[in-house]
Image (cartoon, rainbow, N blue to C red):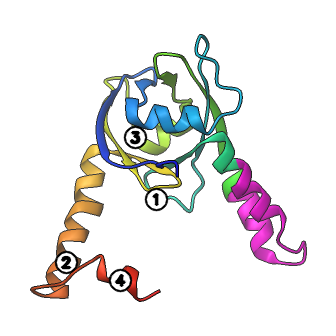
Amino acid sequence: MAVGFAGTYHQKVDGKGRVSVPLKMRRVIEAGDPDWDTEKGGTVHLVFGSHLKGYVQGYTVAQFARLEERILSLKESNPMRDRMQRMILGKSTPLDVDKSGRTILPKEIREKLGVDDAGMDLRYVGLGDRFEVWPAPDYVERVEVEDEAWLAEQGEGFNLLAALAED
């Protein structure tokens, strides 16, 4: 069984959008790209639609193809199909990742993340079938702080993994 995206990584993007994909995530991207070339690199898909508030999502070529198939398998009469096509497929871009794991974030993605000429620190967060890229301060404020508050509400002795037994 292949391991998906996991872990949280700190990366710096410069003002021109140059950034390195963390090595462990690069290995997942490589495994999910049938055209990956050890000399040239390959492709990762980033989704940046307005449904994503302040962050973007990344998918391997294979995962993005499955997502596209699922969206296109919805009935044409389903209004969610049109929205998903516009917000996910229409607001996505394939990015070249070179053999060393470097890529360039396009202007539209830099603007969404708030990257200015000075660059910024990013957080890459693995979620199994996909990963998220957040501006570091937003990740701490919106995700880590909210997670800690939610855990506190659950009370002493709460076991997050116990929820897996409920399915």
Q: Looking at the picture, how far across and down is residue 47, in whole percent? A: 59, 48
Q: What residue would you read off at disc 1?
A: 53
Q: Give the magenta-colored segment's residue range.
A: 65-87
Question: How far is disc 3 from disc 2 in space, using C-alphas?
Answer: 29 Å
Does 70 lie within the magenta span?
Answer: yes
Q: Nearer the viewer, mark 2 or mark 4?
A: 4
Query: Magenta-highlighted stretch: main secondary structure?
Result: helix
In this view, the residue in front, 118 or 12, is 12
Label number found at residue 114: 3
Q: Which residue lies at the image location 79% right of the left edge and 69% below the top edge?
A: 81
Is 131 rendered above or below residue 45?
below
Question: How far is disc 2 from disc 4 in space, using C-alphas?
Answer: 13 Å
In this view, the residue in front, 158 or 79, is 158
Label number found at residue 151: 2
Q: Which residue lies at the image location 31% right of the left edge and 24% below the top edge?
A: 118
Between disc 2 and disc 1, whose residue precedes? Answer: 1
Is 2 rendered above or below residue 72?
above
Relative side of 42 to 144, left or right: right
Crowdedness near tag 2: few (<14), some (14–19) or many (≥20) residues, C-alpha within 10 Å: some
Relative side of 154 to 86, left or right: left
Q: Looking at the picture, how far across and down is residue 71, in whole percent? A: 76, 64
Question: How far is disc 1 from disc 3 in space, using C-alphas?
Answer: 12 Å
Amino acid carrying mark 1 in the image: Lys
Q: Looking at the picture, how far across and down is residue 147, in whole percent? A: 24, 70
